Amino acid sequence: MIADILAQAAPLLFATLGALASEYAGVLAVFMEGTITIAAFSCAAIAYTSGSAALGVAGSALVTMALLFAVARFTERTRANPFITGIAVNFLAAGLIPRLSTLLFGTQGVVQISSRVSLAGESVRNAGFPAALSLAVAFALFLSQTSQGLSLRNAGSAPDALAARGLEPGRYRSLSWVIAAFFASLAGSELVLGLGAYVPAISAGRGWTALAAVYLGYRSPLLCVIAVIVFASASYLTDILQGTGKIPATLILGLPYALALAAFVIARKKKQ
Amino acid sequence: MNRFTRGPLRASRLARLASHAAVPLASFGLALALIAALIALSSPDPLSSVASFFTRPFSSAWYLGNTLDMAGLLILAGTGSAVALRAGAFNLGGEAQIYAPALASAVILAGGAPRAAAALGLPPIATAFLALAAAIALGGALGFIPGILRARLGISELLSSFLLSAALIPVADYLVSGPFRDTAGNLVATKPIGDALALRSILPPSHLNVSFFVALAVAVAAWFFLSRTEPGYRLRMTGSARDFARFAGFPVARAAALAMAVSGALHGLAGYFAVTGTWYRCHEGFSSGMGWSALAIALVARRNPLAVIPAAIAFSWLETASDAATLSASLSFDATPLIQAIIFLVVSARYLPFRRKS
Amino acid sequence: MNVRKRAELEDIHKEFDSVEPGEGEQRRFTALDGVSLAFYPGELHVILGENGAGKSTLAHILSGLHRPTRGAIRLDGETLRFDSASDALRNGIAMVHQRPLLAAEASVLENVLLGAPGTFLNRAKAAKRLAAIKTAWGIELSDRARAAGLSPGDRFRTALLGALWRDPDYLILDEPSGVLAPNERDVLFAALDRAKSRGLGVILITHRLEEALAHADRVSVLRRGRLAFTSAIRLGLVDKDAGGTATVPLTYEFLARAIDPDAPVSAPAATPMRMPEPIPAPMPATHDGTERGNNGSAPAIALENISFESPERAALHSVSFTAYPGTVTAIAGYPGSGLSTLEDILSGLLRPDSGTISIRGKRATTASLTPARLRSLGLACVPSDRAFRGSNPDITIGEMLTPYARTGFFRGIAAPSRMAKELLAREGIDAAPTRAVRTLSGGQLQRLILARELATDPAIVVLASPEWGLDVKSIERLKTRIAELAAEGKAVIVLTEETGSGGISAPTHTLRDGILS
C-alpha cells in the first residue's frame, strides 16, 4: 500500500518542486497544469516516434523548458502580468494538443505508446518516487548551499534587495519558469511512461494541488515532500472510496482546487 | 538656478488614438490568421475551407441568429468582466458563475416550481422571476466571495475566483449527470423547460430572442453607470488610481468586492438567458469556455462596456466561423482556447502592468 | 601611507526625466551639474549638503546604482564604467544606505552573502570570517536573526557587514547617524578610524556639520547639484592635487553658510583653501506669522504625543505641536526623521500607535482617523506624492479635480465639468478637463491640487514637501499663496525637507529622528 501511495505521489512531488521554484521568484505557478499536459504529450509523441523512453523524457524536458522560457522572456520584456500569461499557457495546451494529437496519432483520445516503447510501466512507477525525492534533496541543497540558490530564494520577496546587491531579479524570475518547466516535464513524463499511454487531461488537477502543497509545505522543499505524501494518501483513500461507490468520480475532480483554495485561506489566516 | 529644461514636441493625438486601437486589432488579426492557417493546413480543400470560414456565419438565418444570440450572452458576461476590471479586480471565476446559476434556473423552471406556482394561482412569469432572482443571487455570491477574501485576507481574487470556480464545476457536472439528470433522453442534461417559460425566437430557426436586446441594454446601462454616476466614478478611480482613491477617502476594498459581486451577477444573468433562450436545459459542461471568452472580450474591449458589444459580436462570429469551417472540413476543432490564449498573451502585454504585491 | 587606489569623479552630470512631462515638452531635472571630486584611500571624506543638493545621487553614481548622463569615473587613472552595483563592488566600492533593502525572509548571514561571488556558500567558514569582521567593527548581531525583525540600527549594521564582506577599498555611508544611537555612533566612528589606518577610504554623506568637523579628513560641500567647495580639514594633510599643504580652520558657521543654497559663498575653490570672506546676512524670511497662538484664538489642530513605530518606516516619538488659525507652522525634517510618517498620519492613511489629534477642539480617536473623517473635520492635505497620491497621471484633469463633488448619484458630465473648469480658470491654467493629468506641469498640478483641497473650505491646510520639483517662479507663487491662506485665517502646516533658511517658510519646528523640537 505504501508503495502505491508513493508511486502516486511521484508526479505530484515533481509538480510541487516546480511550483516551489516559481513561488520563490514571486510568481504563482498558474501554468503548471497546462505545462504538465504539454510535457506529457511531448514525451508520448517523442517516445512513440523514436521508440526510446529516454529520448521521450529528454525531449519533453527540452520542449517544455524552451516553451516556458519563451513565455517568461515575453512576460519580462513586456512587463506583462505573469498570472495572465501563465493562464494563457494552459489555454495553449488545451488548444494545441488536440490538434497535434489528431495530426500525429489520428485521435484526440487515449494514445497507447506501450507498443512502441520498451519500458514496463510498473518499473517506471516504482522508480518515480525515489527519483523525485532525490531531486527534492538536491533542490534543497541547491537553495541552501549555493549563491544562485540564495538569490533565487529571495528573488520574489525582495527583488529590490537583490538589485541593490547588483543582481537582476528579472533573470531569476525567468530562471524559475525554466526550473518549473523542468520539473513539470518530469511530472508529465512520469505520468505517461507509468501508464504506457497519454490520456487527455492526464494531469487531473495535479498542477493546482501542487500549489496547495507549496503553501502547506511552508515553502520548504523537504516539508513539501511531507505535504505531497499527505495529499497522495488522501487521493489514495478517495480512490478506494470511489471504488466502493461512496463518492462519485466527478466530485473528486474538484478536490484539488478546493484543497488549494483552503490552503491559501488557512495560510493567510495564519499570517494574520 | 533653474534646473528644469524643456525639450521637443511629442507625437500627435491621432497617432496615439491609432496606437490604442492597434493592440485589440492585432490580437484579433493574429487569432484569425492562426486559425485560418490551421484550417488550411489540415483540410483537403484549403481554399473552400477558409472561404467558408469567413462567409458561413452570414449565410443563413440559422447562423446569423445564433451568432447574435451567443454574442448577447457574451455581452452580458463580458460587461461583468469589464466592470470588475474597472475596479481593478480580475474575475476568473466566470465559468462557474455562468454554470451554477444556469443549473439553478433549469432546475427551478423544469421542476416542481411551475406546478406550485400554478397551484397558488400565480402566472408562469412568477416562476421565471424566481429563477432569474436565483441566478443573479447565486452568481453574485460566487463573485462576492473572492472579493471579500481579498478585502479581509488579502488573497488575490484572481486566484480565489479561479479556484472556487474550478472546484464547483465538477459539483455542477455531478448534479447534472446524477440527481438532476433527465432520464428520458440521451443527453446528459436536466429536463427541458416548458414552452411557456422558454423565450420565443425572433428569427427562426435560430435561437435569437429578446435576451440579445436585454444584453445591449445592460451594456449601455453599465457604461452609463461607470461614466455618469458618482459610485461609478469612484469605482473607476479605485481601479485606475488606487492611491489617489484611498487618499480621497473612497472605500477601496469594499468597492472591489462589490464590483466582483456585480460581475458574478451579470454572469449569472447570462446563464439564465442561456437556459431560457438558447438551450432550454442545462447540459453537462454548460459553460464550456464562455466565462473565459467573456474575460478575453473585456480585455480586448479595454474594459469599456460599449466596446464589449462589437468585441463580443466579433468573438462570436469567430467561434461560429471556426465551427462551420471544421464541419465542412470534417475535422473536430475547438478554436476557442487558442483564440483565448493569443488574446491573453497579446493583450496582457500592454494593458495590465503587473503591480507586484509582496 | 599605502596609496592604493585613488578614486575620481570627473565632470559628472546627472539628469532625470521629470515625473510629469508636459504635453509638447519634456522636462529634465538636473541633479548634478558638472561635479568633479577626488577621493583618497585612508581618508574620511565627508560630503555635506542640504536635501536635494545631489549628495545621494553622487554616491549612487559612484557605487554603480545610477549611470551618469555625462562624465567619467576613474580608479587610479583608469576610466571605468559601472553598469550595476556589482561592477562597482568588484572594483572595490561598496555603499551602505541608511535604510537598506534587505531580504526580509533571509537571515543576517544570508543577507551578507547575497550577491557575493562564488558558487558554494560555505556557511561555517563564512560565519568565522564574519565573526572576525564583527569583532573588528564592534558589531553585535546574531548571524541567524531574520532580517524582517531587525531594528533600523541592526538593519544598517547588517548592510554594513554586507559591504565589508566584499573587502572594499572605498566604503560609502549614507546618513548612518540617523539610525544609530549616540554611543553606537561613537563605536562606528572608532571603527572607521581603525579601518582608515588600514587603508580603507571612507565617504560619509551627512547633513550633520558636527560630524564633519569631528571626524572628517576632507570636506566637500554640494549645493543645488554643484560643488561649492572641497578641502582638506586636518592639519598637515598632504594635498595630492596642489602638491602642497594647506591648513584650514573650518568652523561650524562657515560650513553652515556653505551648505545653505541661498546664502552667497565664495567661489568654488579647489584646495588650498582661503580664509572665508565675511558672509552677508541671510535673506529675510518672506513672511512672518510664525508666532504660536499669540493672537488669542483657540488652536486649529493639536497633536499630542503621537507615536509610531514599525520596522519599515521612520518612527515618531511623542510628537506634539499645536497650530493656530492664521499662522504658518513649518516643520523641517531631516532624512529619516519621520516626516513622511507624520504626513501619512495627517492624511489619515496611517494610524498612530498612540496619541491624540484634536481638530478645532474635537478630539479624534485613532480609529476614526480616516481621510474622509479628517476632511470633514476641516483638515485638507496636499500630499508630497502629487503624481500618484494627490492625483494620477492616467486619469483626466476633470476626474482629478472632482473627488469631493457632492453631485448625488447622478454625476453626469455637466456638473463635474463645470466645477473643473472653474478651478482651472481660477488658477489661470489653460487646459481642457478631458486631458490626462500627465500633461500638466509640476507647478500646475500642485496649484490645482491645492485649489481642489481648498474648495472644501478647510480650516487647516497641510502642505507636504511643496517645494519638491518646482521651479523658482512656482516656488515664489507658492510662498505668496501660503501667506494669503494664513491671512484668510487658515492654519497652514508645511512639512518640508528644506532645512535651509531660504525654503518655503522659515522652520518653526525641526523633526529629527522622530523627535520634534
Image (cartoon, rainbow, N blue to C red):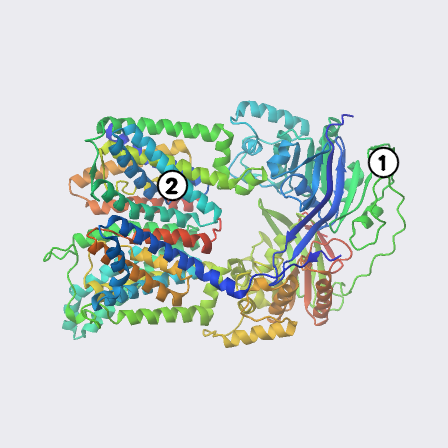
In the picture, measured across the screen, residue B99 lies left or right of residue C410, that is left
Residue C252: x and y in percent read 83, 45
Looking at the image, which residue is at 19% across and 40% down?
A241
Q: Separation of disc 2 and disc 1 at Cα? A: 62 Å
Residue C458, compared with residue A84, is above or below; it is below
Q: Are there few (<14), some (14-19), or many (20+) residues within 10 Å of tag 1?
A: few
Residue C24: x and y in percent read 61, 63
Rendered image quadrant of residue C331? bottom right
Q: Quadrant of the N terminus of chain C?
A: top right
The kind of secondary structure element at disc 1 is loop
Which mark is on residue A67?
Answer: 2
Looking at the image, which residue is at 36% across and 60% down?
B297
At label 1, which amino acid type do we have? Answer: Ala
Closer to the camera, B216 or A257? B216
Which mark is on residue C242?
Answer: 1
Residue C231: x and y in percent read 82, 40
Closer to the camera, C469 or C30? C30
In the picture, measured across the screen, residue B162 lies left or right of residue C84, that is left
Rendered image quadrant of residue A128? top left
- Image mark count: 2
Residue A224, compared with residue B198, is above or below; it is above
| Residue B240 seen anywhere in this rendered image of the structure | yes
Rendered image quadrant of residue C192? top right
Q: Are marks 2 and 1 in contact (CB under 8 Å)?
A: no
- Residue located farthest toward the left when viewing the structure as drawn: B184
Which mark is on residue A212?
Answer: none
Residue B257: x and y in percent read 41, 59
Closer to the camera, C339 or B321? B321
At label 2, which amino acid type do we have? Answer: Leu
Q: Are there few (<14), some (14-19), or many (20+) residues within 10 Å of tag 2?
A: some
Residue A267, compared with residue A138, is above or below; it is below
